[in-house]
Amino acid sequence: MKPGAVQVIDERYPGVDIHLALDNCRTHKHRVVKEWLAEHSRCQLHFTPTSASRRRRDGRHGR
């Protein structure tokens, strides 16, 4: 089973590497997602730092 949004991207852009930037939500690291990614090596997930949402809320953008 493919994750929904990644399935669309995978089908629309065949033959190119796909890099997705995501937050650290547990669902992005679910077993089903990991299994699918293992079969689709051109798709890579990159996670934002855990503190990123807190910094944005506080208004501290790299200061």
Image (cartoon, helix red, strand yellow):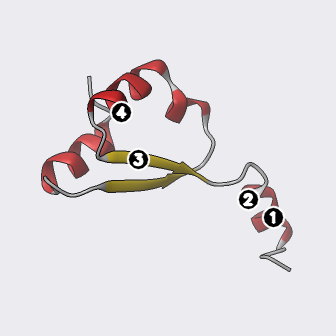
Q: Which class describes the residues within 10 Å of circle 2: few (<14), some (14-19), or many (20+)?
A: some
How far apart are the alpha carbons under marks 3 and 4? 7 Å
Q: Amino acid at mark 2?
A: Ala
Q: How many marks?
A: 4
Rendered view: 21 above or below 59 = above
Q: Looking at this view, name the residue that lies furthest to the front.
A: 41
Horizontal and vertical percent position of residue 35:
37, 22
Give the number of the disc on residue 55.
1
- Looking at the image, which residue is at 43% across and 27% down? 34
CB within 8 Å, label 3 to label 4:
yes
Sequence order check, earlier mark of 1 and 4? 4
Horizontal and vertical percent position of residue 13:
17, 57
Q: Which residue is mark 4?
A: 37
CB within 8 Å, label 4 to label 2:
no
Sequence order check, earlier mark of 3 and 2? 3
Horizontal and vertical percent position of residue 8:
21, 47
Q: Amino acid at mark 4?
A: Leu
Q: Which one is in front in this view, the residue at disc 1 or the one at disc 4?
A: 4
Give the number of the disc on residue 44.
3
Q: Which residue is mark 2?
A: 52
